[in-house]
């Protein structure tokens, strides 16, 4: 049993079995359901068990409290700096789980109320049905604290319309519920006051038939109409600026547009990018661009290499500095090394993308009959 360290009597993931329906609740509400090692292990165990259970047809996932999931528990990463590879297991298990969420064999519905950020959104976006509300907030802000866009989002973002993926990854730009549906990152928009009733109806439906599930959700869903000032209405400018070859050229293009009438919104975008880790921005842009020509498995293996190299400070300690400034000292004044984009050595960036020896890569099963193999405990790392 995986328990919540803040309250030992609470499980960090609750699993319920109701006839043909299976329900997962991410249950770390005081931590905004941030992803911990225990949460990953228990969620993976439930999903494997239920995929193999002929009686299980529909899996519903939700978050306890006011958030769906705020993503990785940054304090776990920060504290892990003291011991080499102390976070390797949770990273390996999470990315391995991401593959299985994307390729899951049973019908899945995510009921997403509140914050759904970074790795937390990997429990939302890949689902057959992802239901969002007016209170849903999505972002992938990793570059702002010296990390990179992970948990399969180098794959997801690279397949978004135009250059929206580069925009979201480099700026940490937020999308609301309606924008998520319009961008294809969620399937349905349901007003928050109807979400509990929708959950009851899905449980009563007691079926994983996709058409039946879709019909029930559509009874509760509202048509999406974007607000006039939505960032998605700036798609042509996003495509123009974020199609440039380098981060430096993207910023230069944004600066040129910012000076034009009606483009005041660009100022905050520029300010955010210029405060982000230069190294992380370069790694992130390359990762998203490579993702366009990579399979899901290839993206996850690449992300595993990037994360391990960042945790090992192979070329920079920016992630630890970013977390310190954001969540430890909370001074919001990170001192990046190097401090500027033109000081980042592209040769060093190449280093973090280099493949590991075959046995030390993330082991994604290649054959359907073996799809739940490749677990951490059977990897070269565990040995």
Image (cartoon, helix red, strand yellow):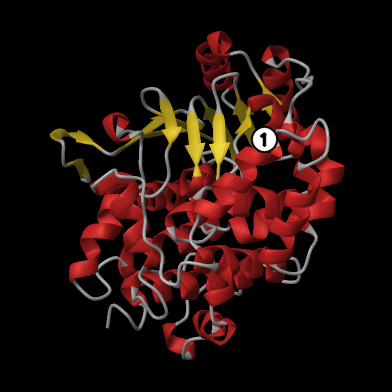
Residue 338: quadrant of the picture: bottom left
Determine whether, in the image, residue 317 is placed left or right of residue 236: left
Q: Relative to the observer, which residue lies in front, 347 or 35?
A: 347
Q: Residue at x 26, y 55 (%)?
A: 76
In the rendered image of this protein, does residue 172 appear above or below residue 212? below
Q: Is residue 130 visible?
A: yes
Residue at image point 41% right, 64% down: 336
Q: Please, is residue 303 above or below residue 265 in the view?
A: below
Looking at the rendered image, the quarter that the N terminus falls into is: top left
Q: Position of residue 343 (x, y in %)?
A: 53, 76
User: x%, y% of residue 252?
Assistant: 73, 58
The residue identified by callout 1 is 186
Residue occupying image coordinates x 34% and y 76%? 312
**Viewer-proximal residue among 369 and 290:** 290
- Does 271 sit above or below residue 321? above
Residue at image coords 44%, 87%: 359
Decide which of 9, 204 is in the foreground and name it. 9
Instruction: For residue 105, say whether it is visible.
Output: no
Considering every residue shown, the one lying at the far left of the view is 8
Judge whether 175 appears above or below 322 on screen. Answer: above
């Amino acid at each position: 049993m995986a328990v919540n360290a803040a309250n030992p009597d609470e499980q960090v993931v609750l699993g319920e079995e109701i006839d043909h329906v299976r329900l997962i609740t991410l249950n770390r509400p005081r931590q905004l359901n941030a992803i911990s090692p225990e949460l990953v292990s228990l969620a993976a165990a439930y999903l494997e068990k239920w995929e193999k259970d002929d009686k299980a047809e529909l899996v519903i996932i939700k978050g306890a409290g006011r958030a769906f999931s705020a993503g990785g528990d940054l304090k776990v990463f920060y504290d892990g700096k003291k011991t080499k590879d102390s976070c390797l297991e949770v990273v390996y298990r999470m990315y391995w789980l991401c593959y299985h969420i994307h390729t899951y064999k049973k019908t899945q519905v995510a009921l997403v109320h509140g914050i759904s950020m970074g790795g937390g959104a990997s429990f939302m976006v890949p689902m057959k049905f992802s239901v969002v509300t007016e209170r849903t907030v999505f972002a992938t802000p990793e570059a702002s604290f010296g990390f990179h866009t992970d948990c399969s989002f180098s794959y997801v973002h690279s397949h978004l319309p135009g250059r929206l993926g580069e925009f979201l990854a480099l700026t940490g730009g937020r999308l609301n519920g309606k924008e998520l549906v319009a961008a294809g990152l969620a399937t349905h928009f349901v007003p928050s006051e109807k979400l509990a009733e929708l959950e009851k109806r899905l449980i009563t439906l007691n079926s994983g038939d996709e058409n039946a599930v879709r019909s029930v959700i559509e009874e509760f869903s509202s048509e999406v109409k974007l607000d006039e000032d939505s960032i998605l209405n700036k798609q042509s400018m996003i495509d123009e600026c974020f199609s440039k070859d380098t981060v430096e050229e993207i910023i230069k293009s944004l600066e040129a547009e910012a000076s034009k009438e009606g483009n005041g919104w660009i100022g905050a975008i520029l300010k955010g990018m210029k405060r982000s880790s230069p190294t992380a921005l370069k790694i992130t842009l390359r990762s998203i661009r490579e993702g366009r020509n990579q399979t899901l498995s290839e993206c996850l293996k690449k992300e595993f290499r990037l994360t391990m190299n960042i945790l090992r400070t192979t070329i920079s300690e920016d992630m630890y500095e970013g977390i310190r400034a954001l969540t430890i000292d909370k001074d919001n004044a990170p001192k990046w090394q190097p401090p500027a984009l033109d000081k980042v050595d592209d040769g060093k960036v190449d280093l973090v993308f280099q493949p590991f020896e075959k046995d030390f890569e993330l082991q994604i099963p290649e054959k359907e009959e073996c799809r739940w193999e490749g677990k951490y405990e059977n990897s070269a790392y565990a040995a």
